[in-house]
Image: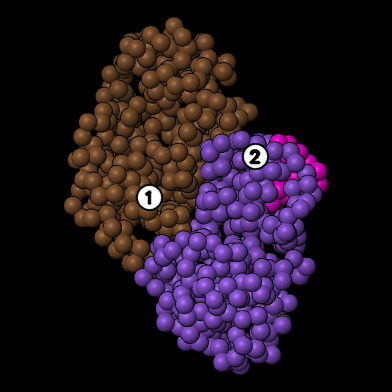
Chain colours: A purple, B brown
C-alpha cells in the first residue's frame, strides 16, 4: 500500500517507520527543511525523535505534491491547531480513492470540531479513520509492544488502516465509535494538566489515582452526552491513554501543570517556550463542549480556573478533592 | 467512638493514627511484642511504617481482651491468609453491638471467601464493612489527600465507618456493592504481578497501559458474573486501586513479578523471604473463582502459567499481547 504520512514530529516519524517496516512504500511530509533533509540523508529525526534509526525506505519531502501523489492511505499527524491548514494545503493532491486517517489527538480550538470532522470539512465525502491508544512514539519506534484503536464509521476504511499499521509488536483493533475515541484523545490532555498540578502541589500517588478515576468518570459523562459509548472510554483509547498520559514519562502537558501547581502563572510558564501545550488549549475546548452539552465536569472546570481564572492551584484542587469525590455512591 | 484496630502493620498503624487524630479513643492489637512496645513507648512503628510519628493517644497491646473491650468499631487489618485466625482469636471479646470492618484486601486462600464473609462466619449476624481504595499507608499517615470506599449491605454500618474515618484529607465514600469492592481488592494483586512481569521483560509503558486496561476489563467480567456492579470496578476501589498498584511505588507483588519476568523461578524468588506476596496466593484464588464462574480471564491465566506452570514469562505475556487485545471491537 502506498502511504503518505503528513507531519514529521515524533509520532509521524514513528508511524512512517512502522509502515515502511511493514513493507509499505512510505513518504513523509514535514514543513521543516532540516527534518526533511536529515530523514533522507541519515534516516533519523534527531529534532523530534532523537536516538532512533528510522527505516531507510521512508522518503521525506516538504512538497505536498511529492508526498500525496498516488497515495492509497494518507495519515495526518499534525498538531490539532494546524491540522486544518495542513489538510487544506495538500487537499488538491490527495487521490480521490485514498483512505484518510488522523493520528493526532485533540479538538480544533475555534470550532470544537473533532479532527476527523475537520478532515471531512476540507475533503468531503471520504471515509476518515481516527487512530488512538496508549502509544509513546519512542516505544513504538523501538518495537516495544503497543496496542491502539482504529475508529471509523466505515468498516472498510478502519480495516484498511488496521492492516496497514499492524505488526507483531503494534496491534490495531477496530472500533466504530469514532466520536468516543476522538473525545478521549482530546480530554486526556486536560487530565494530564490536572495530574501535573497535583504533582506540583505534592499531593502524592493516592490522590493521583483518585484523580484518574474521577477524570475518566467525567470524560465518560461528556462522551455519553455526545453519543459515544461508555465502553470506548473503558478501552485503550480512553482508560489506556489516560493511564499512560497521567503516569508515564513527564509530558509537556503535565510539565505545564507541575509548574502551575507550584504557583507560577500560566503566562510565565509559557513565556519563552516554542509551543503551547495542547492541554492548555484543550482545557478551553473541553469546558466549552461540556457547557454546550450541559455536562458537569469538575476537574476540567478546576483546571480552567487555575489556568485562566487566577484561582490558586491549592484552592481549586482542594475544592475538587473535597467536593467531587462525594459522588461515588450516586453512580 | 471507641475504636479497635486489629493488626499492627503499615496500614493498621496508619488507620489507628487517623482514628486517633479524629478524636476517637483508639487501641491497636499487634502480635509482635516489639511493635506493641515501640508504639506505646515512642508512638511510632519503625518495623512496618518507618519515619512517621503516630498519634500519642493510640494504645497498643497484644492481648485481644485489652483491645476489644468496650469497642464500638472493630477494624480488622490482618493479612488475608491469617485474618480468620485473628478474628477467631478475639471473637469472644468483641462487644455484641460493635460494628465490624475489614481494611485488608484479598480472598481467603482455601475457601475463596471474601474477607467480610470470613468475618461473618466467625462472628455471625453482624454488619461488616469493607474499606478499600487507592491508599498507600505512608501517604495517609503523612496526611496527603486520599479517597476510599466503605462498602456494606448495611447502610448504618457503612455510614458509621464513613463518619469514624473521614477527615479533611481522608475522604470516605459509601457503596453498597461490597462484593464488587472486595473482588477489586483481591484481583488487583494479580494485576500487580502481571505488571511486574511486563516490567521484568522491559516491555515499556505503552504495554503497561494496555495491560491495566485489559486487566480492568477482565476483573469487571468476573465481578458481573458474581453479582457485582460494573460501576464499582470503574470507581475508587477498582480503577483507582489498580492504577495505584500498577503505577505507584514498587510493591512486593510487582517486585515478585519483575524477578519472574527476568526469568527467575518463583521458588527461587520466594526463597529466603519472610512472607509470600499476597498476589501469588491471589493468583490461585482468582483463577479458581474464574473457573467456578465460567469467566475467561486471560491475564490471570497467563500469570498463573508463569508462576505455577513453568511457562516462560515471555511466552505467556507474548501470547497475551497477541491474543487478548483483539477483543476491543467485541465489547
Q: Is residue A312 magenta?
A: yes
Q: Residues within 10 Å of mark 2 (few under 14, many from 20)?
A: many
- Label 2 and label 1: CA atoms lie apart by 27 Å
Where residue A257 sits: x, y (%)? 67, 47
Question: Against A175, is B58 above or below?
Answer: above
Q: Residue at x 44, y 21 (%)?
A: B50
Left or right of B47 on screen, residue B313? left
Q: Which residue is mark 1?
A: B199
Answer with the quarter of the image where residue A79 lies: bottom right
Q: Is residue A330 visible?
A: no
Q: Is residue B301 magenta?
A: no
Pointer 1 indicates a residue of which chain?
A: B
Where residue A307 sits: x, y (%)? 76, 48
Q: Which residues are magenta?
A: A298-317
Left or right of B50 on screen, residue B311? left
Give SS at disc 1: helix
Pointer 2 indicates a residue of which chain?
A: A
Q: Residue at x 25, y 31 (%)?
A: B273
Q: Residues within 10 Å of mark 1 (few under 14, many from 20)?
A: many
Q: Which residue is mark 2?
A: A200
Q: Relative to the observer, which residue lies in front, B192 or B105?
A: B192
Q: Is residue B79 visible?
A: yes
Q: Relative to the observer, which residue lies in front, A88 or A99?
A: A88
Which image quarter is the C terminus of chain B in? bottom left
- Please count the marks in the image: 2
Give SS at disc 2: helix
Amino acid at each position: 500500500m502506498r502511504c503518505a504520512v503528513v507531519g514529521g514530529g515524533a509520532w509521524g516519524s514513528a508511524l512512517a517507520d512502522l509502515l515502511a517496516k511493514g513493507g509499505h512504500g512510505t513518504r513523509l511530509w514535514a514543513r521543516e527543511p532540516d527534518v526533511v533533509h536529515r530523514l533522507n540523508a541519515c534516516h533519523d529525526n534527531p529534532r523530534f525523535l532523537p536516538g532512533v534509526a528510522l527505516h531507510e525506505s521512508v522518503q521525506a519531502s516538504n512538497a505536498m505534491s511529492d508526498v500525496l501523489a498516488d497515495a492509497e492511505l494518507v495519515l495526518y499527524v499534525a498538531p490539532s491547531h494546524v491540522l486544518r491548514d495542513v489538510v487544506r494545503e495538500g487537499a488538491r493532491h490527495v487521490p480521490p480513492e485514498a483512505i484518510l486517517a488522523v493520528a493526532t489527538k485533540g479538538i480544533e480550538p475555534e470550532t470544537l470540531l473533532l479532527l476527523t470532522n475537520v478532515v471531512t470539512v476540507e475533503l468531503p465525502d471520504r471515509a476518515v479513520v481516527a487512530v488512538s491508544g496508549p502509544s509513546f512514539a519512542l516505544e513504538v519506534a523501538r518495537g516495544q509492544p503497543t496496542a491502539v484503536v482504529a475508529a471509523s464509521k466505515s468498516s472498510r476504511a478502519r480495516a484498511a488502516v488496521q492492516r496497514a499499521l499492524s505488526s507483531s509488536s503494534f496491534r490495531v483493533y477496530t472500533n466504530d465509535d469514532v466520536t468516543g475515541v476522538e473525545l478521549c484523545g482530546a480530554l486526556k490532555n486536560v487530565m494530564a494538566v490536572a495530574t501535573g498540578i497535583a504533582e506540583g502541589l505534592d499531593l502524592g500517588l493516592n490522590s493521583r489515582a483518585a484523580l484518574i478515576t474521577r477524570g475518566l468518570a467525567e470524560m465518560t459523562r461528556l462522551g455519553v452526552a455526545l453519543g459515544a459509548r461508555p465502553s470506548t472510554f473503558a478501552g485503550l483509547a480512553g482508560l489506556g491513554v489516560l493511564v499512560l498520559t497521567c503516569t508515564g514519562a513527564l509530558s509537556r502537558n503535565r510539565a505545564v501543570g507541575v509548574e502551575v501547581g507550584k504557583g507560577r502563572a500560566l503566562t510565565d510558564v509559557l513565556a519563552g517556550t516554542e509551543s503551547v501545550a495542547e492541554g492548555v488549549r484543550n482545557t478551553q475546548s473541553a469546558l466549552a463542549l461540556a457547557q454546550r452539552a450541559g455536562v458537569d465536569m469538575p476537574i476540567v472546570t478546576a483546571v480552567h480556573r487555575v489556568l485562566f481564572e487566577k484561582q490558586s492551584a491549592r484552592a481549586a484542587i482542594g475544592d475538587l478533592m473535597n467536593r467531587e469525590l462525594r459522588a461515588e455512591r450516586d453512580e
